[in-house]
Image (spheres, rainbow, N blue to C red):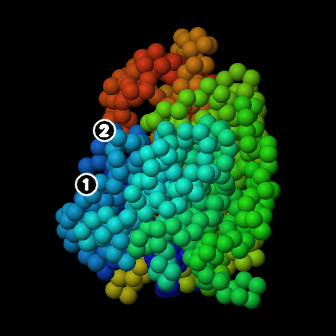
């Protein structure tokens, strides 16, 4: 499984590679994935074969020892569906059942493939394609059931999780994560019994935009309790004032929801962020462990979501055992252990006047997988001291298929204040690999790293913690104290979760190295452009002698064209950009999956056709003609040119991250 076992601890008992000999590690082989997109998948190693999945859900099988390609399967995801993925057309992994590889595609299909040949056995569509759903998380197989969630809350959908028979694809159950339109009655699904209770925590007409609450990544399973644990996401719109104007907790946004594995029926929930208002998704790694707390052995869930608090929950009941912030937090002062609720800072419930809040929407910990080592009794994950300037847009009108944050403050005096607060963010932000003691609820050690977006974590019985870093390296640290034991430059930042496995008596380590996806989205606010090699699957062993090819030469930033639009047009373009483009191309047009400040003259000349006619749909840039007029696009273009001129001459072309 993507976490090795149902516990999802990402702990390996292998110790052939260990703290004493890891210095002998070298590259055994690599495979070019032929993409500059982000590659976030944790591969699977089974019986001497590595199964892997790349951008657009292209799936590969390799001989794990030699790297020989055994087969490739391309599900031919429509490239226009890339528009609906907030953070590129990525996949975070695949699943395995008996002799089948199971993948979930961006456009909502679950496909079962013959593990020997890659030939499809069955395929089912999991969501209505009339809504902007997507799937970027790994499907999970729990005792013959394929369980999968979806994304799309930012664009306006109603989140749910569904389960299918792993042998046939037959639907078993479906659980909605937010209530629907009350006038339409029950859905006829497993969630029906609990939806009336959830609906009491909402106000207004939230169902017109779906409500959100998508389970876009972590889903876990306890076979003894027969429970599936679902981590849920942000609301739609994100700003509660636009989503649920009368307030309310808005269940089950930003929660862990436990359901019966056989029937999908509700068992318990714990809401980590009542009335979610800051894009604090709670879809991060849900890890199971057995801990001794106050002299008692407890079966617990460990969770470090975006909101900056580390939670320990009883996994049978969902009762909060403890919670402590692991990064600076200003939206709440603490979690009340009696009520289980946060003690909120009222100022963090922003209005139209910009306010600085920590963490920001990239989170104290995002999707990058967390690991837990039962020997050291520590959890390991990349942490981010992240801040964000929040403000409401009083003129916001929710529109399905468009980014629906409901945030404003991008023009006039509010923009001036935003810019000043942004300078404060640049002084405060930090990122590091964090080792956290979940019993003491305190940091055991930290390793500072440059730039957010450091990768998922694996820990082993060799006293190792393995992580890709924004130093463009694969790095290995001693698990007990964080000392750097080995590091290799790999020409890009590996953001995916590593794995380790044995073949013919040799231990290997494998990781996908492909900067982008959610990491590039986190990078938006830095205004920094990263030079990197195309994505690769990298496989290491003791004594490995393979070498990577030379890096491609970097290109100079082209000079922007003259700005001929008036100030009113640029201001209008700023608002349109924030509501339509920033999801992929960064707030204030900085960073993102494609930094538009760096367009060449040819791209500028084709700008209207790219946006309105979809002339680059093959690269995932679909037409926006259903949302934007010619005048809208020209205003957006003027704003981008304005931003390019503002930043022209800044140091945005460095070939490695700041801090190296």
Sequence-wise, the earlier of marks 1 and 2 is 1
Callout 2: helix, strand or loop?
A: helix
Residue 608 is situated, as x and y percent measured from the top left of the image, at: 40, 21
Q: Would you name the residue on which mark 2 appears?
A: 618
Residue 144 is situated, as x and y percent measured from the top left of the image, at: 34, 75
Q: Would you name the residue on which mark 1 appears?
A: 74
Dot 2 surroundings within 10 Å: few (below 14), some, or many (20 or more)? Answer: few
Instruction: Give whichever of 523, 402 is nearer the camera.
Output: 402
Q: Residue at x 51, y 18 (%)?
A: 635
Q: Residue at x 65, y 52 (%)?
A: 249
- Whether 82 is drawn above or below 4: the answer is above
- Whether 450 is drawn above or below 336: the answer is above
Residue 370: which numbered mark, if any?
A: none
Callout 1: helix, strand or loop?
A: loop
Residue 98 is situated, as x and y percent measured from the top left of the image, at: 28, 78
- Whether 239 is drawn above or below 371: the answer is above
In screen coordinates, is 560 left or right of 618? right
In screen coordinates, is 46 left or right of 651? left
């Amino acid at each position: 499984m993507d976490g090795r076992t149902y516990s999802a601890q990402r702990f390996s008992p292998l110790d052939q590679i260990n703290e004493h000999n890891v210095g002998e590690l070298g590259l055994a082989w690599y495979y070019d994935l032929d993409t500059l997109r982000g590659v976030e998948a944790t591969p699977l190693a089974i019986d001497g074969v590595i199964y892997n999945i790349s951008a657009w859900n292209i799936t590969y099988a390799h001989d794990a020892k030699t790297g020989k390609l055994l087969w490739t399967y391309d599900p031919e995801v429509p490239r226009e569906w890339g528009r609906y993925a907030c953070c590129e057309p990525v996949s975070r992994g695949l699943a395995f059942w008996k002799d089948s590889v199971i993948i979930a595609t961006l456009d909502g299909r679950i496909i079962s493939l013959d593990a020997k040949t890659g030939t499809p056995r069955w395929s089912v569509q999991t969501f209505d394609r009339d809504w902007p759903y997507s799937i970027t998380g790994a499907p999970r197989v729990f005792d013959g059931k394929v369980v999968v969630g979806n994304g799309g809350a930012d664009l306006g959908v109603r989140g749910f999780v569904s389960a299918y028979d792993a042998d046939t694809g037959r639907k078993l159950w479906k659980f909605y994560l937010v209530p629907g339109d009350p006038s339409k009655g029950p859905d006829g699904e497993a969630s029906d019994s609990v939806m009336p209770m959830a609906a009491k925590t909402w106000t207004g007409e939230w169902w017109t935009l779906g409500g959100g609450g998508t389970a876009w990544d972590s889903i876990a399973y306890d076979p003894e309790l027969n429970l599936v644990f679902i981590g849920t996401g942000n609301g739609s719109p994100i700003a509660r004032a636009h989503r649920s104007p009368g307030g309310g907790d808005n269940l089950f946004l930003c929660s862990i929801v436990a359901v019966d594995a056989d029937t999908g029926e509700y068992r318990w929930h714990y809401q980590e962020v009542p009335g979610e208002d800051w894009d604090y998704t709670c879809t991060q790694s849900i890890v199971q462990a057995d801990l001794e707390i106050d002299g008692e052995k407890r079966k617990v869930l460990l969770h470090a979501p975006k909101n900056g608090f580390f939670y320990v929950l009883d996994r049978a009941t969902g009762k909060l055992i403890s919670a402590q912030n692991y990064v600076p937090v200003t939206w709440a002062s603490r979690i009340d252990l009696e009520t289980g609720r946060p003690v909120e800072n009222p100022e963090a419930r922003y209005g139209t006047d910009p306010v600085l809040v920590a963490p920001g929407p990239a989170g104290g910990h995002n999707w990058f997988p967390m690991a837990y080592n039962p020997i050291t009794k520590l959890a390991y994950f990349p942490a981010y001291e992240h801040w964000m300037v929040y403000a409401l847009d009083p003129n916001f009108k929710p529109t399905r298929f468009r980014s629906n944050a409901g945030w404003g403050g991008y023009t006039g005096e509010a923009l001036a204040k935003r810019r000043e607060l942004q300078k404060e963010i640049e002084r405060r932000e930090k990122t590091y690999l964090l080792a956290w003691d979940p019993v003491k609820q305190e940091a055991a050690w930290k390793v500072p790293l440059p730039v957010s977006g450091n990768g998922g974590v694996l820990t082993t019985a060799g006293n190792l913690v393995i992580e890709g870093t924004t130093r463009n390296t694969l790095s290995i640290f001693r698990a007990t104290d964080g000392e750097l034991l080995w590091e290799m430059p790999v020409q890009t930042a590996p953001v995916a979760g590593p794995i380790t496995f044995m073949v013919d008596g040799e231990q290997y380590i494998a990781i996908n190295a492909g900067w982008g996806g959610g990491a590039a989205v986190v990078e938006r606010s830095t205004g920094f452009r990263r030079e990197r090699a195309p994505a690769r699957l990298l496989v290491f062993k003791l004594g490995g002698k393979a070498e990577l090819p030379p890096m491609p030469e970097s290109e100079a930033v082209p000079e922007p064209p003259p700005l001929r639009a008036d100030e009113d047009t640029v201001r209008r373009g700023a608002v349109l950009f924030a509501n339509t483009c920033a999801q992929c191309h960064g707030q204030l047009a900085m960073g993102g999956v494609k930094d538009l400040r760096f367009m060449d003259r040819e791209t500028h000349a084709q700008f209207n056709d790219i946006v309105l006619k979809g002339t680059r749909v093959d690269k995932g840039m679909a037409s926006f003609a259903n949302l934007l007029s010619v005048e809208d696009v020209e205003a957006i273009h003027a704003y981008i040119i304005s931003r390019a001129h503002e930043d022209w001459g800044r140091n945005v072309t460095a070939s490695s991250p700041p801090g190296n």
